[in-house]
Amino acid sequence: MTSRQDDLLRAQALGRAQITPEQVGLPTSGRRRVPGLRREEVAVLAGVSTEWYTRLEKGHISGVSEDVLDAVARALQLDDDERTYLFDLARAAQPPSRAPRRRKAVDIPPRVQWLLDSITLSAAFVTNGRLDVVATNALARALFSPLFESETTDERGRPSFARYWFLDRGAPDFVADWDSALGATVALLRAEAGRYPHDKALRELIGELSTVSAEFRTRWASHDVRIHHGGVKQFQHPDAGSLELVYQPLDLPLSPREAHSLTIYTAEPDTPDEDRLKLVASWAATRLAETELPGVRSKKAS
């Protein structure tokens, strides 16, 4: 069995386990060996034979139509992200028409950096599907200074949210709900693995985190999926103290070869959090000006 087939089997089995017969209007009688739906019950709900659904769950999905996959998704009550993941796995399991090409890193166009730099009162940055930070504005660098200064950055000094949350000992002190940050990170990487199953860098990242972090291994086995997310996070900034910020990621279609997301963190207007974020923005602007002014370093040195 390939890793793609194994992913499909586990994802659907976990989906079955989370739904009770009562939730879908099926009668129950006698003792049940499984807490959720049986395979034959999902097959009835999806309008397919039990034998066919069993083969599907085991990863034999060559030639399966989107209508059938959609029926299975409805039977398992998958949300939009989980449904997308199921379809991504199905596409990945199809025999490739040609050998997959290795994905190359996409250069961020200057216009994207100009956009980021024009945002001065919100922290804004761009990540790829592996959650590497590939572009940022000054406020984001100041807000996420523990991330940018972490030893978990790669050899080029590029920050990685995935490595930071799981491998940096100081990460739990930086964000209030560290458990939620871990869960979201794994779910986003799981979705990325469904979209780009042949991404060598992604496989290496997952392998590294699975080897080093028992927490990651446990969460990766749960097969949670998340594609679109947003909400509120509370940070304990090393200089500004407590900050509660609203964040919203936006898809940034820069290339068909790699997914990118633009994420913006901002504070609710007329709140102490907005005042503290403006303070961080002021510090960031000052530091940026100092690095751009000629002679500043030499004057400090003298």
Image (spheres, rainbow, N blue to C red):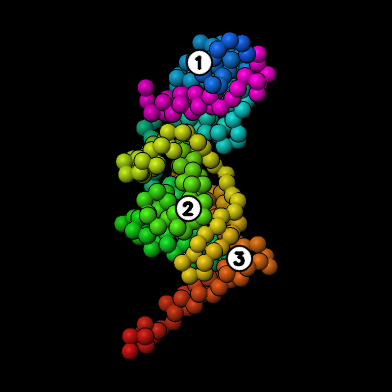
Query: Magenta stretch mostly in which secondary structure?
Result: helix
As drawn, 79 above or below 129: above
Q: Is residue 45 visible?
A: yes
Residue lying furthest front: 31
Q: Residues within 10 Å of mark 1 (few under 14, many from 20)?
A: few
Residue 288 pos. (x, y %) = 47, 75
How many discs mark residues in the rendered view? Answer: 3
State the separation of the CA atoms marked 1 and 3: 51 Å
Dot 2 amino acid type? Thr
Q: Nearer the viewer, mark 2 or mark 3?
A: 3
Residue interval drawn in magenta: 1-27
Q: Earlier in the sequence, mark 1 or mark 3?
A: 1
Residue for point 50% across, 15% down: 33
As drawn, 166 above or below 17: below
Q: Which residue is mark 3?
A: 273
Depth check: 28 or 255 in front? 28
